[in-house]
Amino acid sequence: MSETEVMHTSESVSASSVQTRSNKRVKVAWNTAPLPAVPVAEWNHIKRWNPFNSYKLLAHVERWRRIKRGKPLPAPVLVTVDPSNVCNLDCDWCNAAYIRSHRKRMLSKSALLHIADFLPNWGEGGESWEPGVKAVCIAGGGEPLLNPATGAFIDRLVQNEIEVGVVTNGLLINRYTDALSQCTWVGVSIDAATAATYNRYKGLPANNRSFDKILSNIATLTDYARRHNSRLGLPHPGYGVSYKYLLYKDNIGEVADAAELARSIGCKNIHFRPAGATWDNKDTEDAIRFTPEEISLFSEQIRKAQTLDRPGFGVYGVTHKFNTQFAPNNCFSTCHAVFMTAIFGPPASQNADEDSFVLALCCDRRGDPKLELLRDVVDVRQINKVWGSPAHWAVHDAISVHKDCPRCTYQPHNEIYEQVILDDSMTHVFI
């Protein structure tokens, strides 16, 4: 089995320093936790080339080779846009709780459409690379479909030939069925297989019927996309609706049942991963931790769920960004992902112009001013002035990965940058 096919490697080593080809010695926090008796596959070996396999990042190595101090930077391949910092649920593990409580605003329709029109031209007139952003992940922040302009934003992005993915809690899917059907994928954060568990972790009364409504919304969307031959309904393995499932305490025992449920309502796949501590709760009593018993139960449940994997439906237990105890596994020394992606969010100040936005650099640290490159600006053209500027590099220089960062969404990006681009550990020209 390759390392992409197995949840954990077979060795356990202690923290040490590593000598790079650039003669820079960096400290790497290797995982030292005990390994489970039997490795658990993240996914079916036959489906190893799937949307959740971080090896796809290697396709962008030549673009990232241009990340050099003092030189112009290419536009990101992917950006995230948070239309709303307001939510209609209150998940126990919400990684945007800080920004939801401190910045309760939305992006205006004008801001969203200006962003949509800027993205395909980002970096135009620059160096030899092709300008423009290729894909947008619409997420939060809060619930993106609470913003009434999100549908028009999706339409404009598609019109501009930018691929779109949406992360939503699913409660308002029925309002945007046609727009969502144009997306490459829609990830619905459900995190349960029963209404009782769902309501307990979403801050809802025990008798609330939201769980059933979301399942109905998904079934309607998948049927609509299929009947209208929309992008979301095409047979491509990376397209479709994903049932998203964060592991958290006693929802672990419902993993297998959730997989069966996801398949029955027309989802293309189900995606499991551990919930993680937020940047403002890192190393506190509120940080999320898993017991060996909970991890063992997940191993048992994911094996059951994977028996449902077949053509047209995938089961993905995505854990390669964590160590064996589902704790952060940030095996890189500095963050270069701040040059690979960006997050557009609602204005930070209550008195900011209603058409303004924030340009941040990390989706795991939403609301952290240290990771914001522009704040409360209206003119999207300012982005070209600051992208790759000394101010941009100053953000990079100030990041202390092991001190400040929670589990890193961009861990594979940074590891590939250091190991493949900076140190050429793979001797990449020998193909």
Image (cartoon, rainbow, N blue to C red):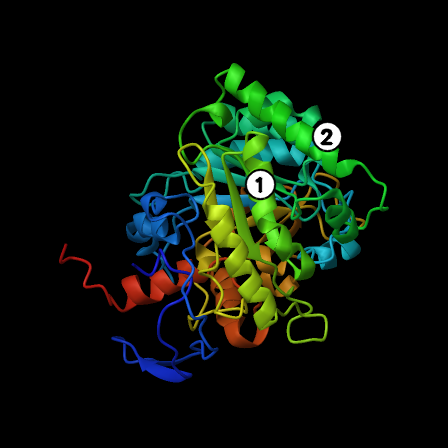
Q: Residue 79 carries which label?
A: none
Question: Label 1, on which residue?
Answer: 243
Relative to 267, say whether 304 is above or below.
below
Q: Is any atom of residue 166 visible in this view?
A: no
What amino acid does circle 2 point to? Answer: Pro
Residue placed most toward the observer, 369 or 412: 412
The CA distance from mark 1 to mark 2 is 24 Å
| Quarter occupied by the N terminus | bottom left
Image position of 156 with respect to 143: above or below: above
Kind of element beneath mark 2: loop
Residue shown at the point (51%, 45%) measured from the top left: 79
Question: Which residue does the image show at 41% across and 50% down from the upper left?
Answer: 43
At a point 45% along the width and 70% down the height, the residue shown is 36
Horizontal arrangement in the rendering, residue 242 relative to residue 289 (left or right): left
Q: Mark 2 = which residue?
A: 148
Dot 1 and dot 2 residues touching (CB under 8 Å): no
Tell which circle, 1 or 2, labels the residue nearer the N-terminal end: 2
Give the mark toward the camera: 1 or 2: 1
Q: In which quarter of the image is residue 134?
A: top left
Image spot of residue 176 (x, y percent): 66, 25
